[in-house]
Amino acid sequence: MTIDTNTVVSMTEANQNFSRVARVVDKYGKAVVFKNNAPRYLIVEFPAADKAEHACDEDVLSSARKLMDQYDAAFAELAK
């Protein structure tokens, strides 16, 4: 994910001045809160979060089946 430097806010600033974070989200559509010099939280407008892409149930079940088949022996050992 590419992070626009205009949307970066430190954790300290987010705690002390959340209205600035809200203004960044209003202007750019999102804000990235950094904690310990690493991106930690993504804040988006509510309508954008509602439109976010979600995996359909079939995709999730298909991926789960592949993992179960791939690591069947390990799961059997853990089940003992």
Image: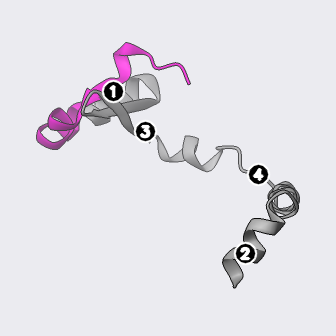
Dot placed on the residue nearer the N-terminal end, 3 or 1: 1
Q: Quadrant of the N terminus?
A: top right
Tag nearer the camera, 3 or 1: 3
Q: Circle 1 sits on which residue?
A: 24
Q: Which of the two residues, 63 or 7, is positioned nearer the viewer here?
A: 63
Q: Amino acid at mark 2?
A: Glu
Looking at the image, residue 40 sits to the left or right of residue 13; the answer is: right
Q: Which mark is residue 76?
A: none
Dot placed on the residue nearer the N-terminal end, 2 or 3: 3
Q: Circle 3 sits on which residue?
A: 42
Q: Circle 4 sits on which residue?
A: 55
Residue drawn at point x = 21 percent, y = 40 percent: 18
Residue drawn at point x = 37 percent, y = 14 percent: 5
Dot placed on the residue nearer the N-terminal end, 4 or 1: 1
Tag nearer the camera, 4 or 1: 4
**What is the secondary structure assignment of the residue under circle 4?**
loop
Dot placed on the residue nearer the N-terminal end, 2 or 4: 4
Q: Would you say the residues marked 4 and 1 are in contact, meaning their CB atoms lie under 8 Å apart?
A: no
Q: CA distance from mark 4 to mark 3?
A: 19 Å
Residue drawn at point x = 79 percent, y = 61 percent: 71
Quarter-of-image position of residue 19: top left
Q: CA distance from mark 4 to mark 1?
A: 28 Å
Residue 54, given in percent of the width and then of the height, sits at 71, 50
Residue 31, given in percent of the width and then of the height, sits at 38, 31
Q: Residues within 10 Å of mark 4 (few under 14, many from 20)?
A: few
Q: Residues within 10 Å of mark 3 (few under 14, many from 20)?
A: few
Q: Amino acid at mark 4?
A: Ala
Q: Amino acid at mark 1?
A: Val
Above or below 68: residue 51: above
Q: Which mark is residue 77?
A: 2
Q: Which residues are magenta?
A: 1-20
Residue 73, given in percent of the width and then of the height, sits at 81, 67
